[in-house]
Amino acid sequence: MKLSLKGLALATALVWGLAVFLCGLANLIWPPYGEAFLKFLSSIYPGYHAEASFPQVMLATLYGLVDGGIAGLIFGWLYNQLSG
C-alpha cells in the first residue's frame, strides 16, 4: 500500500504547526511553560527568538507548518520507496 504524499505532508504540517502554536500560546499565558522546547526551536528556526510575544509565536508556527510538511513528504516518499 502506498501513502498519499500530499495527504501525509498536509497532516504532518498541521500536527507539527499546531503543536508549536499551542506550546507558544501556553507560554504566553503561563510563562515558564515549554521554555526549553521553545529555546530548542529558536536554535533551529532562523529569525525565531524564544520570547513571549505573539508575532514570535506566529513565526514559529509558520516554520512548524513548513518543517512538518517537508518531514511528512520525506517520510512518505521514503516509506513508498521501501515498501514496494
Image (cartoon, rainbow, N blue to C red):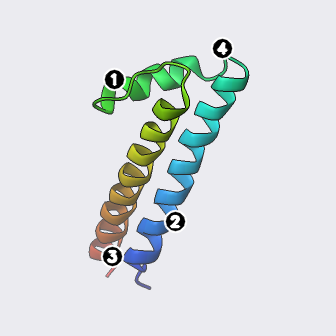
The three-letter amino acid code for the residue at tag 1 is Ser
Q: Quadrant of residue 25?
A: top right
How dense is the environment of label 3, judged by Cα within 10 Å: few (below 14), some, or many (20 and up)?
A: some
Report how far apart the C-alphas of labels 4 and 3 lie in the structure.
41 Å
Q: In which quarter of the image is residue 84?
A: bottom left
- Residue 29 rendering spot, x and y as whole percentages: 72, 24
Which residue, given by chain and number where applicable, does mark 3 sit on? 80
In the displayed structure, would residue 56 be above or below residue 39? below
Q: Do the residues labelled 3 and 2 touch (CB within 8 Å)?
A: no
Taking the spot 37% from the left edge, 75% from the top edge, the residue there is 5
- Residue 33 rendering spot, x and y as whole percentages: 67, 20
* Nearest-to-viewer mark from 3 and 2: 2
How dense is the environment of label 4, judged by Cα within 10 Å: few (below 14), some, or many (20 and up)?
A: few
Which residue, given by chain and number where applicable, does mark 2 sit on? 11
Which residue, given by chain and number where applicable, does mark 4 sit on? 32
**Residue 18 circle label:** none
